[in-house]
Image (cartoon, grey):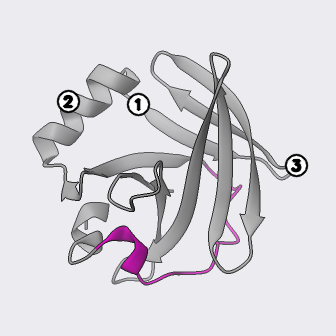
Amino acid sequence: EAAGEALTGGPLFDLPLAETPDSLTSSPWIFTGAMFDGAELSDEEYAALLEEIYGGSLEFVFNDDGSAQMKQGGGSADGVYEVVEGSGLRVTFDIQGTEEFYACCFTPLEDGTPIMVAMFDETGSNALYFAQ
């Protein structure tokens, strides 16, 4: 099931929340979809976004020491994260001298698999989705 299918039906702030998974640092979180201006991207839009903006791949990697890395087809950016009890993660990446902030929460698919929702503005209608 695609991440977007699990997240339809309301604003991102109304998602059912899951605990931050114990597997957070065990493997990369791979981009699986997105929402912009409250609308889920179609498969075609997702593929085009992944290729045009991220060079064909996008991953968030979290390390046990609180460091993070955004890896994409065209390079990578270093950052930091902190676990916020009850609400997920605060993640900040340094993108060519500019701090880019993500508020991340986890929501379960029907089978319980966690999806990370990385909101990048305060509206709750713009986010990237990731799965391990």
Point 77% across, 57% down: residue: 82
50 magenta-colored:
no
Element under label 1? loop
Cα separation, mark 1 vs mark 3, equals 24 Å
Report x, y in % for residue 116: 49, 62
Q: Nearer the viewer, residue 49 or 11?
A: 11
Front label number (1 vs 2)? 2
Residue 11 figure quarter: bottom left
Dot label at residue 57: 1
Q: Is residue 36 above or below residue 51?
A: below
Residue 44: in sight, yes or no?
yes
**Earlier residue among tags 1 and 2:** 2
Query: Which residue, given by chain and number where applicable, does mark 2 sit on?
Result: 48
- Amino acid type for the residue under numbered disc 1: Ser
Start-end of magenta stretch: 11-27
Report x, y in % for residue 89: 66, 61
Instruction: State the residue lying farthest toward the front.
Output: 123
Residue 117 figure quarter: bottom left
Residue 58 figure quarter: top left
Q: Nearer the viewer, residue 55 or 38?
A: 38
**Earlier residue among tags 2 and 3:** 2
Magenta span: chief secondary structure: loop
